[in-house]
Image (tube, coloured by chain):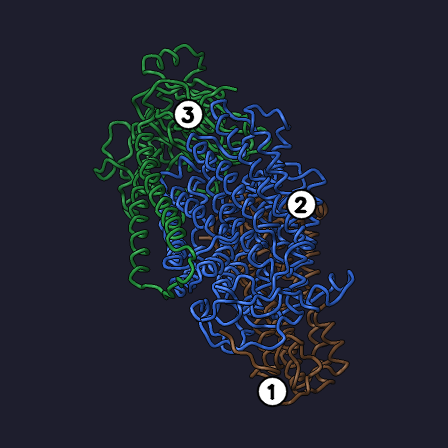
Chain colours: A green, B brown, C blue
Amino acid sequence: MQFKLPLFPEQASSVAVQVDAFYLFLVLITTFFSLLVALLILFFVIKYRKRPGVEAEQIHGSTLLEIVWTVIPLGISMVIFVWGAVLYYHIENPPANALEIYGVGKQWMWKFQHPGGQREINTLHVPTGRPVKVTLISQDVIHDFFVPAFRVKTDVLPNRYVYSWFTPTVPGSYHLFCSQYCGTKHSAMIGEVIVQKPDDYAAWLASGKAEGSLASMGEKLFQEFGCGTCHRPDSGARGPSLQGLYGRPVRLSDNRVVVADDNYIRESILNPNAKIVSGFQPIMPTFQGVVSEEGLIQITEYIKHLSVQESEPLNNRTNPTELRDNEVPTIQQELQQGSQPAPTPGKKP
Amino acid sequence: MVKRRDLVSTNQTTTTEHHPALAHHFDNMEQQQGASTFGMWVFMLTEIMMFGGLFAAYLIYRLKYYDAFKAGSTSISVSWGFANTLVLIASSLTMALAVWAAQRGDRKKQVTFLILTMILGAVFLGVKAKEYKDKWEECHIPGHVIGKGFNTWGGCDVNNPKLGNIADEMRDPKEHGDPSIPEVSAIQTAKQTEIFFSFYFAMTGLHAFHMVIGLGLLTWLTLRARSGEFGPAYYTPVELGGLYWHFVDIVWIYLFPLLYLISRHQHHG
Amino acid sequence: MSTAVTTVKPVMPAKHYLNDNYGIRSWLLTKDHKRIAVLYLVSITFFFFLGGIFAALIRLELLTPQGDLFQSDTYNKLFTMHGVNMIFFFLIPSVPAVLGNFILPIMLGAKDLAFPKINLMSWYIFIIAALFSLAALVSGGVDTGWTFYTPLSTGYVRTNVIVMAVGILIAGFSSIFTGLNFIVTVHRMRAPGMTWGRLPLFVWANYAASLIMILGTPVIAITLILVALERGFHIGIFDPKLGGDPVLFQHMFWFYSHPAVYIMILPGMGVISEVVTCFSRKRVFGYSFIAFSSVAIAVFGFVVWAHHMFVAGISQYSAMVFSLLSFAVAIPSAVKVFNWTATMYKGSVTLETPMLYALAFIGLFTIGGLTGLFLAALGMDVHIHDTYFVVAHFHYVMVGGMVTAYIGGLHFWWPKMTGRMYPEAPAKLAALITFIGFNLTFFPQFILGYLGMPRRYHSYPEEFQVLNVLSSAGASVLAVGFLLPLIYFLWSLKYGEVAGDNPWNATGLEWTTTSPPPTHNFHEVPVVTEEPYAYGEEEGSGVH
């Protein structure tokens, strides 16, 4: 038996330090109050032990004390809550320039795809020094993507993309655990996250035999399934144009406005009638069962690369999600107003 | 700390005669009746939580799959549902009359009204059976274990392809459908109605299960009423049976609009 | 004041509830709440040791990093059956169905619970549920985890989930009827003079727990019905392939299962209130605050369920709301801990076995509760969710808290229930062994959890081994600590010293009647004129 007794996981991400600081604070509070209670008990048991001739004093209580020991714990709890909430907000919201990697979990393995098309099974190479966002989905049951060294975790759900982000800081090899019980080989669904300095990471990327970037593989699927037949940028197209779609708000036929994110694109391919873009007919067939999760990821990546060319951002705002609901034009309106430029069809990213 | 008093507690009535139905752990009939009724209300609270959980899940999915649930609602018969509603309301009336008769010690009326309530309850279950049979024939039973398997898009019967074909109904103007919906989308929505039907059978099934238990309870009460057990001094079991029966009725009053009525026959936007 | 006290050696009463009637029918058809309590005692003790065997096997496997003792599927069944049996067939009934059933009516001055036949039916429902559970066990066990997350449980395992789910939902009805009985009894059957403000805190605690029982348990019943339907008829309610939402299952499951932990702990807290006052010879500090905090825990307990789901895919906004509320629910428990501690201030404290368990409870529950704050804090929970940190947390509150309170309560009321004292020296030894074994078992798991060892892991990376070995070593000590009471309690039935009416000189109506009590609880109906825990002015022949 190896006599290794680690007490703390390694700190390998930018947020690990913050989480550990928070942990230390919580440990101190716990230790303080536990010791306080334990010592008080010990003290009272000894000092007020039964002695002949000494009777207990019948005290009803003290409202003041009750208030004190309600308000103080409440105050401390609120401090903990706010600290935890702020940290959580940071953990859950990736910065905009994150390197995007995709992962698919299935019983009982992890499959990762890098934007350049490199694929890995049960290992994940990432570079230090920049934020990495892993977008994940499950092919079967609920799994969980957990890297203790990074202090990040997210359940990986079927039928819905989730993500986890981190900025690795220390090169090395770290455990990746599935931490949502998923059946027989749950404890074997272990992977390795290999953090490398940017140069080494670039070398690794170059060494693998990728079939082409994710986006180019997505473009192949796009053409193979004939998506371009309907999804064209011209005004007579039967389907909405996908140019610059990713991340933009979209007005639907029932007047709702949703943002075209990963989940929206995936749903539109698998369940097209769930959300119909305003001004279009619900005629798109479903591709459920026809395209795999990896294929969906590749198509999404391709769509992300269909950028709006040299046009003013809509309404002079740079962040599409800043648009208010009633400012979002329908695709028809845009085409009529000529504010959507005609992109070059089939341009490779 | 505690003073003891011999013999009786202060609550007991001065008469030493005990009603035969007084349980030994109660001081008097009033306490027994109060406790029993209170207990019944607490029990109904638990039932509300149980049906409530189911209703909440139904409503969540209804928001998620609005069109499919609309199509599902349209495909179940509102006439039979309405008829059943009237039957149940009538049965609550007869049940209330049974309680009233028991209060007055009128043996004949008690038994009559209890039996009438049971008959109406049986009618309800009969109508439900007919509705279930219709769903069977239309292949609207979810899952693929019972019947010919779930199918709301291709018609269920080779000889009668319209039977149970929700996809067609969604597009048929004579069925208040919208012909401009393409067939492909109608079929896709029709496939999603399986979740609606899962809830339909779970909700009406749980309700019917409670009705069957209610019929059993009423049978037992009828037998006891026949032997003249209930009168002004003691009619609690009938009252509790009434509470249970009214509760089952109220659950149906919620079920009927939730399943049959909302967004029925509305035209597409 | 006289200095010489003549102690009369207590004698067993001639007739009491145990010897009033003989024969198996008199037990299986009894309406006496005390006999029903004994029936429950035997049943849940069986499940405690069954669940304990599963735990022992789990800890044996975890001695080594490789999964070399059991196959993966077997191990998965072990932790599932451990959880299911311990939670639904031991912890939830424990204090209410054994101690509550026995003591609550007597504490109120009533002759029985409001609905004795429903009480008996509740035990039979428990037994039927137990049979379902055992059937699931012998037909190969279930391997979904006690949480039955979908779609794993509805579409991906081949074990007997339906039988197990039905067993659990039936057990839920047993719990519902017990709670219903308690609520009506407390409302309608108090002795003359027993106002709400004079109720012992054990009654308040069980009342609050009963509120949760009747409101929360039906939701798990319907959730499990839906799971069973989905599995049995292949319909899709939680199945994502059909458009179902697996996260909805989690919401419905935790809507009950979180309040369930308060069903488990509140009655235990009630025991502590009774024991600490008795062995400090003092009225409890802050009676109304303890009473109302029980109800506050019951109410708040219903609005925090999604803190089990912070990383499950709920929105950040919901997560913040649930985190805030989870901190709120911790405060009433803290108030109780401080009040119990203050009760000993200027008291006259002795350390009989029940008091040892009560003090252990206060300490261990404090640690367990404070580690709950780690989990309620969002940024922290992301790292420690679904790791051994959670396992350590809930074992601290459930075993260090609840089981400790239950065993302490058994010791406290054992003389009342059986007329015999347990042997004090072995009992104290067992308490010490349990305390040491418990901490050795579960404290290392906090560290393991922060290191990142996930739950439900059959095999694990090597660097976790030392802590796992410590934990398993502790488990073997803990097992001894739990076995000893079984032995000496049984021994005491025949050889224990006769207890007499009030061996502890405690207040409370239960101590005014004989040990064991007569079938109708009291020979004369009591009338209550004083506050609870009136330790300052005692009558009776007890020696100070």
Q: Nearer the viewer, residue B239 or A99?
A: B239
Name the element at disc 3.
loop
Q: Amino acid at mark 1?
A: Thr
Taking A23 as reference, is C507 left or right? right
The mark found on residue A33 in the picture is none
Q: Amino acid at mark 3?
A: Pro
**Which residue does the numbered mark 3 point to in the structure image?**
A6
Disc 2 sits on a residue from what chain? Answer: C
Name the element at disc 1.
loop
Q: Quadrant of residue A298?
A: top left
How busy is the neighbourhood of tag 1: few (under 14 within 10 Å), some, or many (20 plus)? some
Give the image location of residue C12, x and y in percent: 67, 65
Q: What is the distance, in whole Å, between disc 3 and disc 2 at their CAs?
A: 47 Å
Using the rendered image, report if marks 3 and 2 lie on a common chain: no
Image quarter hosting the N terminus of chain C: bottom left
Q: Residue at x 76, y 76 (%)?
A: B223
Q: Amino acid at mark 2?
A: Gly
Name the element at disc 2.
helix
Is A232 situated above or below B212? above
Using the rendered image, report if marks 1 and 2 lie on a common chain: no
Disc 3 sits on a residue from what chain? Answer: A
Q: Nearer the viewer, residue C529 or B108?
A: C529
The mark found on residue C232 in the picture is 2
Give the image location of residue B91, x and y in percent: 65, 74
**Which residue does the numbered mark 1 point to in the structure image?**
B13
How busy is the neighbourhood of tag 2: few (under 14 within 10 Å), some, or many (20 plus)? some
Residue A338 visible from this viewpoint:
yes
Q: Nearer the viewer, residue A335 or C284?
A: C284
Is A57 situated above or below C369? below
